[in-house]
Amino acid sequence: MFEARHTMDAPTTASADNGTAGGGGWFMPRKMPPDAPPTDGREAPEARPPTAVRPVGRPAAEGAPGPWTDPSGPAAGSDRPAPMSGAPAAQERIPPSGPSVPAPAAAHTASAALPFEQRVPVQRPAPVTEEASPDAILVRRTMAEVAPVADKVTSYFYALLFVRHPDLRSLFPAAMDTQRDRLLRALLTAAEHIDNTPVLVDYLQNLGRGHRKYGTRAEHYPAVGECLIGALSRYASAVWDAETEAAWVRTYTTISQVMIDAAAADALRAPAWWYAEVVSHDLRTPDVAVITVRPDQPYPFLAGQYTSVETPWWPRIWRHYSFASTPRPDGLLTFHVKAVPAGWVSNALVHRARPGDIIRLGPPTGSMTVDHTTDSGLLCLGGGTGIAPIKALVEDVAEHGERRPVEVFYGARTDHDLYDIHTMLQLQQSHPWLAVRAIVDQQAHLQLPDAVREYGPWNEYDAYLSGPPGMIRSGVDALRDAGIPSERIWHDSVEELVVIGN
């Protein structure tokens, strides 16, 4: 998703530059600045103090694909990579050389083909109208054409990529089903925002920075663009022509350049990833753990943000978790993790991780942060482990010495699921401006969003939501009904919130 503050329905405007802005032609992005260090290594520009943390499984060559180099973070709401399928069967049918297309140029395609771990914003796809730019019309027309066979398109793309560029296979997880789903979502996001330059660029810059931890380099983008064009031209043959191909090339070239530039700039000030040692593991319920880790070097972030986590037990599989507090003087980070059925990473963290284990963290990201330039009240909805970033937001308001009203609705299915209610009630006792309400479905026969309607009015509040996709969907509807405009509703959406054709 767009990792700058975003709302549910950012407007789509016809203002994007769809030319090759800074691109080098057929999938040939500009070279990175000469003073920029490689974007796939661990080195930051400044010297680091020695650390007692001993990483597990560090590759022999830092930044090179290996047991700890993750190139592919499955969707935020899905913690289970499914068995690989599609690619091997398709390999025999792939021509030795693809369409005569050079390499990067497709609005979100770069982000899709390469590991896609950013959360996608919830936006309604703009209809193809004459108000859209010519490239946007062609790109969206292509996506409409391939939508019925999206699974074939993505499977063919990855098969094409791995046959022509087998060296890139190590950048992806062994199980590719979730990765294929991400490609489609990224393409949809690209088609959606192709004419909304601020939103698209912000999204891509964060995506480019996030891809550093996968070992993604500038030279990988041409291969991705080439194979993307090959897959689209094969399955969108009814609408594909030279003009459409040129539109995709221009789009991908521009997008990939934004990502490359963002990664190069980020490499000048931050490492590609952090190692972190587990220092405490508190099992609150049979399937929820509060885990505290110590990064191997300073880790700057803001309350309300999240990061991606990789465990040594499932290399190249990353999942998103929100920080459960504001930045602490001791530098420790805390996460709330719920083990979900067949969830590889979540089950490893809840049931297998112990103090002394080493995990890996991606860069902090997310836009669900408090605007301290206003004095509006905060209405916070947290469902399940979604209470973690809500708790951090409350702490953030307290640390700034503000007395703005903060209303927290803590939703759970049963009393047992209110694993952090005592902490929230303690915060309420310490801060008179804070009100905490626990909403238990099985007791009230009421969903969290419905309970919010019972209180209010909320028209003077900024709203923050964190929890399962279904809760966020219904919560946003409830908040709009309560009079809160869309531009004052904040959340870091998960990819599952993108509804095709809505």
Image: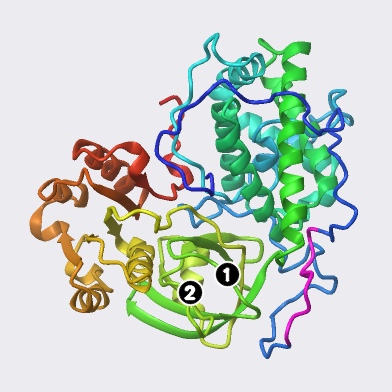
Q: Determine whether, in the image, residue 9 is placed left or right of residue 2.
A: left
Q: Amino acid at mark 1?
A: Pro
Q: How many marks?
A: 2
Image spot of residue 490 (x, y percent): 38, 48
Question: Which disc number belongs to residue 233?
Answer: none
Would you call the spot at circle 1 few (<14 residues within 10 Å), some (14-19), or many (20 or more)?
A: few
Q: Determine whether, in the image, residue 30 is placed left or right of residue 402.
A: right
Quarter occupied by the C terminus: top left
**Residue drawn 70% across the image and 41% down it:** 87
- Residues 352 and 208: in front is 208
The span shown in magenta is 39-49
Q: Amino acid at mark 2?
A: Pro
Q: Which residue is mark 2?
A: 327
Is label 2 in a helix, a strand or a loop?
loop
Q: Are marks 1 and 2 in contact (CB under 8 Å)?
A: yes
Q: Magenta-highlighted stretch: main secondary structure?
A: loop
Q: Which residue is mark 1?
A: 300
Res. 201 image quadrant: top right
Image spot of residue 156 (x, y percent): 70, 33
